Image (spheres, helix red, strand yellow):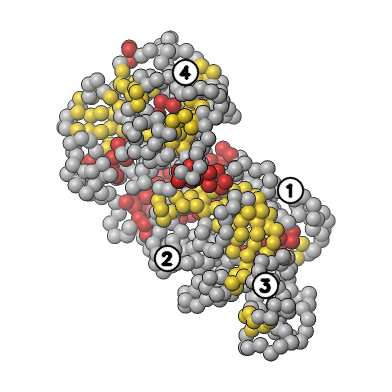
């Protein structure tokens, strides 16, 4: 089949590139060294250089980093002088053959494997490495703050023993999880050219698996869960089982991945095909040109570990990889190899490059959230001195016009938070009047309506009478908060596991969560009181175009994270007003439309119906969707002989800022004749057209 990049057998067009085409990646069998092994100081530059010189103009003090050869002057040993600049710089060593070959990786097709070099910056590291250095000794920590600053050594845990009961539990869980999502036998075409639904399912499965491994590791003595890196282990399992999307590398946009999509782990980007290396900042592929293969960059990650200049939402000044930090603490100039060479080639081939920006995670100051900022093109390249004194490559990337906002939206939100600018359309800066730990803005940018009908804001659920427990309810004496693996009766009520991470991410699914109650002595910050500690994200109530008032977040929300509970007044089933538009009815049936296993959700021991018409919280503004991004979870708080049941809302998948939060209202039973069907405007491709 003719290569998508070729207009003929041995030519490369300069016209538009088909960014949706899947490129076949073949190993590079033979390459001519990029630099001559022994440059002649008296000879002019020749065509022996496989790389192409960067184009200017160069900023003041910068020097073009090509060609590397000695001048007629007699410099010091190991240095040369660039004509017209008159300063010395090191002559790079000859580049090894296959220096930018993409080796076969155990991680799966298309991934860049480990170089096993000592360079720790923007180089390809094995996916089982247990630290993620950003090139300056800092940790590139994942969503749950997992990671430790230590030498990169492979740890041996029980998970590495195929005969262990631990592995048997994991393997059984994985097979059950994949079976419930129909991922045991995946259509190869859908795997190669994935749609949005399939990409979402892959990420959801990965996160459910990662969270379950985290929960199992939490109670295991000996090795901490942080050292075991459940994010990498879950990713390796998904790769091995074939639970991944867009398995072939490609230039340009990736099917099923939208501009503005977010990731909390590098492995998520690997699994959906947006950026293959689990740690390297530059991803590239071999493309056949004039009979030979050359590398072209397909994506880059700019996460703050280098001297990048990325504050401009339309322009990114990106630093090359390598040469910044070595194990022997020596500094060295970057070389025009591997990812750097791929970026240089992409400059001259004018292909689009995907840009992912790693930003600070609001929920975990040492963690990052990765934002897909869309397609860029490389316009210039040059060399300049880094702060450490070594020469580094610089590439100017300009965002392709006409794409949705991504990084620029994040900048605007941060300015709202910092008070630098005012959020347009604000009616009230905090409709909760201080009832919540974080303010909730009321915003209307659609029409002149000044707000919803009057109601009293309450942050908790109110019972006329508490539910009596048939047995003596446990309570704990954990003055410092409940801990995993302890004999705490509240933890034991959850099967001996913690239900949440410290960041408020739910580790279990479809089971009743037992939280500490009023009789427990643990503080409000206890990991077993997540739903009681208030909002975790900065929310806003906003006017939609056709659905009344809705709810969304200024902050990114990770899969499984607690959002809010449904507050209001618990009412009797026979006292329900069918004209009440602010009803939560747990007795409804829920068609499994959302990307969750097709099992029955946990049930309340009695018909729980909540009215938020007169009293309620932000949960009352969450609209229905046939393809929701939020689900509800039953929670019980026990206190002596009484129990109170609550409804908590959690994220099904990662939710970018300013995306509406929705859940499935469910279907009423046939005997409730008073319920009126309402037209659904969710806009989902799976919309059934109505809800109750």
Q: Where residue 430 sits in the image (x, y, percent)?
A: 40, 33
Q: Residue furthest bottom?
A: 74
Q: Where residue 65 sits in the image (x, y, percent)?
A: 67, 72
- Disc 4 or 2, which lies upstream in sequence? 2
What residue is pinned by disc 4?
Answer: 692
What residue is pinned by disc 2?
Answer: 154
- Disc 2 or 1, which lies upstream in sequence? 1
Query: Is 146 displayed left or right of 43 in the figure?
Result: left
Query: Is 195 displayed left or right of 629 in the figure?
Result: right
- Disc 3 or 2, which lies upstream in sequence? 3
What residue is pinned by disc 1?
Answer: 18
- Mark nearest the camera among 2 and 1 is 1
- Disc 3 or 4, which lies upstream in sequence? 3
Whole-angstrom CA distance, mark 3 to mark 4, is 67 Å
Q: Where residue 559 sits in the image (x, y, percent)?
A: 44, 42
What residue is pinned by disc 3?
Answer: 63
The one of 225 and 527 positioned closer to us in this rendering: 527
Does the residue at mark 3 contact the one at mark 4 (Cβ under 8 Å)?
no
Q: Is residue 96 above or below residue 687?
A: below
**Which residue sits at x=47%, y=76%?**
329
């Amino acid at each position: 089949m003719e290569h998508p990049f070729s207009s003929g057998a041995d030519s490369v067009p300069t016209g538009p590139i088909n960014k949706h085409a899947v490129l076949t990646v073949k190993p590079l069998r033979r390459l001519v060294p990029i630099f001559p092994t022994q440059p002649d100081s008296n000879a002019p530059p020749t065509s022996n250089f496989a790389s192409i010189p960067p184009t200017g103009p160069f900023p003041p003090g910068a020097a073009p980093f090509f060609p590397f050869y000695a001048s007629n002057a007699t410099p010091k040993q190991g240095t040369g002088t660039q004509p017209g600049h008159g300063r010395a710089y090191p002559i790079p060593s000859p580049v090894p053959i296959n220096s930018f070959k993409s080796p076969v990786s155990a991680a799966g097709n298309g991934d860049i494997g480990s170089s096993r070099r000592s360079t720790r910056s923007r180089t390809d590291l094995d996916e089982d490495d247990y630290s993620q250095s950003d090139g300056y000794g800092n940790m590139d920590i994942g969503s749950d703050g997992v990671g430790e600053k230590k030498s990169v050594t492979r740890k041996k845990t029980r998970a590495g023993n195929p005969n262990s009961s631990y592995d048997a539990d994991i393997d059984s869980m994985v097979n059950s999880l994949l079976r419930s999502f129909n991922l045991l036998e995946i259509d190869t075409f859908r795997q190669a050219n994935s749609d949005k639904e399939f990409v979402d399912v892959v990420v959801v499965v990965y996160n459910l698996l990662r969270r379950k491994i985290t929960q199992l590791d939490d109670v295991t003595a000996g090795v901490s869960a942080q050292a075991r890196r459940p994010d990498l282990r879950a990713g390796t399992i998904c790769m091995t089982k074939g639970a991944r999307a867009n398995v072939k590398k490609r230039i340009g946009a990736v099917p099923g991945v939208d501009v503005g999509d977010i990731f909390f782990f590098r492995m998520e980007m690997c699994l959906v095909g947006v950026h293959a290396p689990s740690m390297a900042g530059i991803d590239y592929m071999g493309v056949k040109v004039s009979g030979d293969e050359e590398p072209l960059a397909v994506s880059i990650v700019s996460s703050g570990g280098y001297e990048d200049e990325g504050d401009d939402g339309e322009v990114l000044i990106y630093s090359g990889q390598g040469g910044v930090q070595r194990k022997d603490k020596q500094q060295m100039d970057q070389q025009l190899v591997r990812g750097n060479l791929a970026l240089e080639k992409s400059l001259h081939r004018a292909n689009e490059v995907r840009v992912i920006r790693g930003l600070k995670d609001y929920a975990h100051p040492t963690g990052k959230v990765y934002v897909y900022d869309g397609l860029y093109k490389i316009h210039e390249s040059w060399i300049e001195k880094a702060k450490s004194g070594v020469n580094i490559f610089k590439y100017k990337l300009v965002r392709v016009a006409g794409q949705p906002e991504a990084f620029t939206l994040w900048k605007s939100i941060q300015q709202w938070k910092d008070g630098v600018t005012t959020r347009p359309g604000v009616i009230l800066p905090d409709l909760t009047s201080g009832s919540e730990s974080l303010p909730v803005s009321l915003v209307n940018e659609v029409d002149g309506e000044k707000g919803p009908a009057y109601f009293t804001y309450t942050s908790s659920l109110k019972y006329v009478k508490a539910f009596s427990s048939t047995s003596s309810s446990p309570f704990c004496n954990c003055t410092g908060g409940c801990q995993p693996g302890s004999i705490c009766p509240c933890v034991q009520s959850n099967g001996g596991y913690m239900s949440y991470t410290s960041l408020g991410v739910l580790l279990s699914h479809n089971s009743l969560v037992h939280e500490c109650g009023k009789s427990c002595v643990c503080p409000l910050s206890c990991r077993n009181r997540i739903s009681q500690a208030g909002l975790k994200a900065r929310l806003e109530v906003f006017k939609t175009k056709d659905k009344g008032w809705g709810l969304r977040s200024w902050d990114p929300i990770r899969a499984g994270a607690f959002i809010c509970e449904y507050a209001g007044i618990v009412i009797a089933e026979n006292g329900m007003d069918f004209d009440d538009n602010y009803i939560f009815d747990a007795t409804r049936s829920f068609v499994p439309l959302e990307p969750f296993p097709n099992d029955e959700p946990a049930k309340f021991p009695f018909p729980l119906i909540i009215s938020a018409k007169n009293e309620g919280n932000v949960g009352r503004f969450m609209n229905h969707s046939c393809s929701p991004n939020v689900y509800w979870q039953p929670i019980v708080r026990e206190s002596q002989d009484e129990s109170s049941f609550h409804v908590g809302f959690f994220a099904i998948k990662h939710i970018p800022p300013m995306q509406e939060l929705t859940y499935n209202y469910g279907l009423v039973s046939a005997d409730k004749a008073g319920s009126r069907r309402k037209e659904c405007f969710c806009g989902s491709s799976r919309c059934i057209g109505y809800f109750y």
